[in-house]
Amino acid sequence: MVVTRRRGSIILHGPSGSGKTTLAKIYAQAVMCEAPLENGSPCSRCDACDLYEASRQPHFHEINSALDGSTQEVRNLVEGDLLIKPFHADAHVIYFDEAHTLTNKAQQALLKPLEQTSEHIVYIFSLIEPEALIAPLRARCDQFSLGRPTPDEARRYLEQICQSEGLSCEPAAFDLFVRYAPSFRQLAQALEQVATAAQGRPITVDGARTELRRDTVGHVLDYFQALVAGDLDQQRASLAAAQLSPAELANRILDLLLHLKLTQVGPSRVQRQNSDIGLLVDDGDCRALVAGLAARAEVLGIELATLMDEVLEFWSYMPLRIDETVLEAQVVRFHDLMTMDRPVQRDRSEIAARIVRASEGTAYRSNAGRRKPPAWRTGDASSRADQGTHLNARQAEEIYTAATFLAQRYGVTFNARLTLNHAALGISDEKQAVALTSDLGKELGQRFDVWLKDDPGGPDKALLHRVVLHERLSDGTLASTILLHLDGAVEAKARDWIFRKFLAGRQLGGNGWQDDWLEVSHAKSAKGALAHQWQLVRRLWRGLDPSIEVDGVPLIDRLDVPNAWRQPAGDVSQRRFSVSQSLSQASRQEMATDLPSFRSLFAERRWDQLFSGWELKAFEARQTALHRLRMIQGDLQRERAVATDSLAMRQLAFEEEQVQIEVKIMLKNQIYNII
């Protein structure tokens, strides 16, 4: 049976991820197919289909309009390859992806070829808005609008992927994906992200929610938890870790506040639809945040609903230009306003009188002062860096993060502990104790670099990795614990310098120091090194608040801190905990620019695997991946150096980008498999 086909040039338009590219390529194959099926689909058996599916079809011309959309490029194609009758297909197919980037002259150059219809030449244009193409070009093509998938279509699409990939997924998880992802592409990406994290286990709705919120609302949730805890550094770090623009972050902050208002605080309560916040943040998280806000409202002497309204007002009226600096200024101002410790007076007559005097004064320059300031913005702000006599959950996580990052990034572990008893040194002032510890770490780091450079086999640049924790002991004296990595080549030099030069040179009072303040252990195996590191870290965790629970179990038990070690960390007014620059948030972000392989199982709440000893294997996998990437990049750069054709240079640049993506995906999968 002979099937008559109507070949025509088409325009496919619709939102991103609606399937334009996929449909365009199916249509292209069907047009070139030598024996299409009755429904018009390609046969996938003829020579033309074989060449197409092997990405070797010479008569399929895919053009990225953003790169090759100039008038000259279009003319070269029309006046060159298309003049030759196709030998390996029934027609030439020219596919312009991102067609809205074609210049006006390039579009005009296509008008005559489109008008001179030929059954051997078919043009396909795909873009979001068809109005981006000039009217004469649109008039010469059939237009097809692609919309977002319906819930039933989205569900069938996910079920097909699961069936082909052998994935098991709960029906409730399907519902979450369908509500979360508005396009086919986003559906596939979301399913892949969650399936990778599940590592072969069935995909559950809770697991999907946890994984999907990691890169969307997770950092904003972390920001609010740090806000309630009064930790400005962690607030800034949480927002800095989010892969979102400042404007998107501000909108997500406002979205979470609105969600709390409508679902938890009221007085008007409604169920929100089509909101990432409502889908990905569970009721337990919301209740914890509302409890923190309620505590702040009580301190301020106002109702929770009033505080909520004022908070919404603060984040609703943002500057027109929101960049990183503006957002940081908003975060700092909001922190100051939320951490006031003095309840405000309900009698606001004095405040009103000051506003009147200001408005009548000659120096009055703005009508902003005429607005009645909210009661909660008029108190005194005073806070301490670390409150309480125990470590909090954030500090425990930061200690873990520093230790696991050390192994994953540098391939070494903490193997030394230096304990400074400040009373024995004649120091009772906290500021003096913190300054002494800070100076010791900085100066030891400088000498550490010199010592290893002098070693014939030493590195060009050596870093002294350290974690510092300050505590007040039961007798009221101060103690500082420093965890270090000391190479065997410098251990003796470090011990001599610390006790014979640094401390001796300070001429401190007290009874002096002892050499056993520095304990160093050199494990013979990677497993032993990691086991020793976690024992050292558990000594720092001994002051963790025993009332903190995760999933109904005390966090201090989750971290395997022996009962015999547990004791309060004491009241310290200075910053209790710090890390070296090599282990800071900035270093973790810098690491991600090469290959984003760093993971924190604490943040992922994988308590049973915290101390499984996988980090050094992850380090080796990352080094291997980096080596492979550098070699391929070197080869491509050498090819680019001798290339004279601009198209060839673009192709090489594209190949380099693709290689980097492939290596990153490979490394991510390796890390998941290691754990």
Image: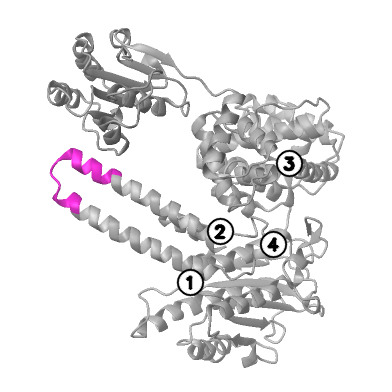
* Residues in magenta, as a range: 639-654
Task: Name the amino acid, label 1.
Answer: Gly
Q: Within 10 Å of the Cα at label 3, are there few (<14), some (14-19), or many (20+) other Cα atoms? A: few
Q: Quadrant of the N terminus?
A: top left
| Coordinates of residue 485 in the picture (x, y in percent) | 53, 78
Within 10 angstroms of label 4, few (less than 14), some, or many (20 or more) residues? some
| Residue indicated by mark 1 | 411
Mark 1 or mark 2: name the one nearer the start of the chain.
Answer: 1
Residue beneath disc 2: 599
Marking on residue 607: 4
Residue 603 seen by the camera: yes
Q: Secondary structure at mark 4?
A: helix
Q: CA distance from mark 4 to mark 3?
A: 20 Å
Q: Are marks 4 and 3 in contact (CB under 8 Å)?
A: no
Disc 4 or disc 2, which is closer to the eye? Answer: 4
Q: Which residue is label 3 attached to?
A: 282
Question: Mark 4 belongs to which amino acid?
Answer: Trp
Q: Main secondary structure of the magenta part?
A: helix
Residue shown at 76%/63% (left/top)? Answer: 555
Q: Of label 3 and label 1, which has the lower sequence position?
A: 3
Q: Amino acid at mark 2?
A: Arg
